[in-house]
Image: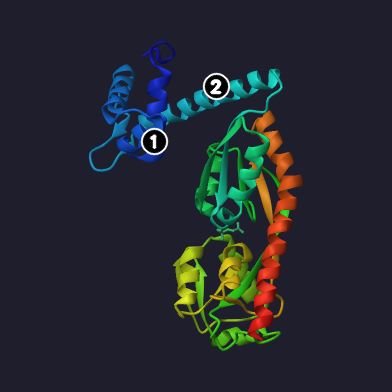
Amino acid sequence: MKLAQRMTLKQLRALVAVADSASFTQAARLLHLTQPAISMQIRDAEAIVGQVLVDGRREIRLTPAGEILVRAARQALHGLELAEVELKARIGVAAGTLDVVAITTAEYFVPYLLAEFGRRFPDITFRLTVANREHVRALLQEQRCDVAIMGQPPRGLDLRRIPFAPHRLSFVARPDHRLAGRKRIPPAALTEERLLLREQGSGTRDNLERFLRAHGVKPLAADELGSNETLKQAVMAGMGIAFLSHHTFAMEVESGRLVRLDVVDTPVIREWNVVSRTDRPMTPALDALLEFLQTEGAARMRGMERWARIAIGARQKKTR
Ligand code: PGA
């Protein structure tokens, strides 16, 4: 086989792109190539390896041989990216591409932080993935991201966690809901409500379940709807009430389409963390991002929080 002598970086990149997108067309788009060019790279790689790497009979999937090669390809490509960063660092530039993964709820603020960071460090580019908890865990476990921005870090991995901002969560309802505008609603009042839930395993869901358990509340009924956006739409449609992060609903509260319910012991306050593997090599770019999140990033988050508090507070006064 003599892979190291015969395989090319083009083939490795094509294979990783097919693995990531599970599609030849998508992979071609990612690499700015044509689809036949991608197929050719994969066929050539298969000829060198002497085994089928991609199984395309029904859906595009890596074979076990393909998995082995993709793992090695990722390491090789990552090694080159690190070398690029080090080479740039020699001439004093924090540069390179950072793989950032944001847990679903963090998509409401992470772009604002990266926009600011990008202005400071124009030589650093991003690959931002928004993913649910299970996917974030897999990306951390497989060394496929530099940092994850999330609430509670997943268990069982060797991770470093830096808290950088508070995270508030509350119940929201439609403005014509019977509890809207009421002060100091006892959690027991929620037993009469139909509650709309995020999917099992989501941080938001976890926080809600802890709150309900702590107050011994069992809602009338509960529907699982999956995403923050769907939950908001369902609340606005009058399907029930939901427990959500303030980041997700401040805008709807400001425009009068939702209200925060003043339930006793809410907002629940947790924290946002930047999480990375302890064995992830520290690069100047990663170092710059961590430093930024703890200083200017945290200050920006306080600014966003202040805005959300004012928006939510002002609207609550009007509803009373
Ligand atoms: P979620 O996570 O978007 O899965 O609800 C938020 C969090 O990590 O707290």
Can residue 277 be seen in this snapshot?
no
Label 2, on which residue?
Answer: 80
- Indicate the secondary structure of the residue bearing disc 2: helix
Residue assigned mark 1: 19
Numbered circle sitting on residue 100:
none
Residue 286: x %, y % from top left:
66, 35
**Along the polypeptide, which appears first: circle 1 or circle 2?**
1
Above or below for 135 versus 190: above
In percent of the image, x 45 and y 79: which residue is there?
239
- Toward which corner of the image does residue 97 lie, by quadrant? top right
Helix, strand, or loop for circle 1?
helix
Quadrant assignment for the C terminus = bottom right
The residue depicted at 63 percent of the width and 28 percent of the height is 95
Q: Examine the rendering and report whether any part of residue 217 can be seen.
A: yes
In this view of the protein, which residue sits in the foreground, 45 or 14?
14
Amino acid on which the number 2 mark rests in the picture: Leu
Q: Is mark 2 within 8 Å of ligand 1?
A: no
Q: Amino acid at mark 1?
A: Ala
Image quarter hosting the N terminus = top left
